[in-house]
Amino acid sequence: MNILILQGSSRANGNTSWMAEEFSKAAEAAGHKVTLVNVAHKKIAGCLACEYCHGKGNGACVQKDDMQELYPLLAEAEVLVIASPVYYFTLSAQIQAPIQRMYAPFKPAKVKKMVLLLSSNSPNVYDGAIGQYKGMCTFFKFEDAGIVTAKADEQKTEATREKILELVKKL
């Protein structure tokens, strides 16, 4: 399968980055093609709601920024992995912009499954992010292939790695 991981933390050696990298390594070892993009290091603006994409743009966004690099990857992905820290009860701002900009093509054409990887230093802060993820799965008719969360004492542990490996096995 062709897997696209959108990682939304600016911390290169942070917990979310670790989760995304562990998922990537396991998926590649299982024979999947994986592209991991740290969207926090990209210049991607939020959706303008201008409707250019659904009119004159014919599915192309009027904004020309680093999202242009993601559109071809999204068009070929069969599995979409969203990896995000939870700073304040929802997905990071860095991952929100590319999610909003998926509006231009309306839906990643080949994606059948989605995965969510979340980290936070606090417990019990994941409901908003999980709600958005489940809403996306429902709206786009993507299979929810699983969620892994890691609070402070679960980060970069063998137990969390095992949860990630189990998700990869189910793909």
Image (cartoon, rainbow, N blue to C red):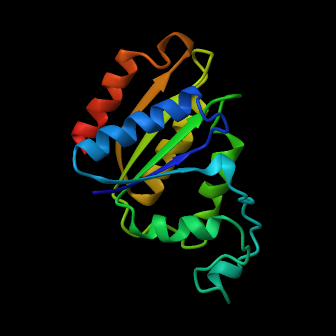
- Furthest toward the bottom, the residue is 56
Q: Residue at x 68, y 55 (%)?
A: 42
* Residue 134 horizontal side relative to residue 128, left or right: left
Q: Nearer the viewer, residue 100 or 45?
A: 45
Where is residue 116? Give x, y as percent.
Answer: 46, 39
User: Looking at the rendering, which quadrant does residue 75 occupy?
Assistant: bottom left
**Residue at x-position 74% and y-position 68%:** 49
On screen, residue 45 above or below 163: below
Residue nearest the viewer, comparing 36 with 44: 36
Residue 150: image x %, image y %?
Answer: 49, 21
Image quarter of residue 104 = bottom right
**Can you give x and y, in whole percent of width and height, for residue 141 in the image?**
38, 57
Residue at left offset 57%, top offset 37% = 84
Which is more toward the observer, 106 or 76? 76
Residue 7 versus residue 80 in the image, above or below: above
Counting from the top left corner in percent of width and height, residue 158 is at 36, 16
13 lies left or right of 167: right
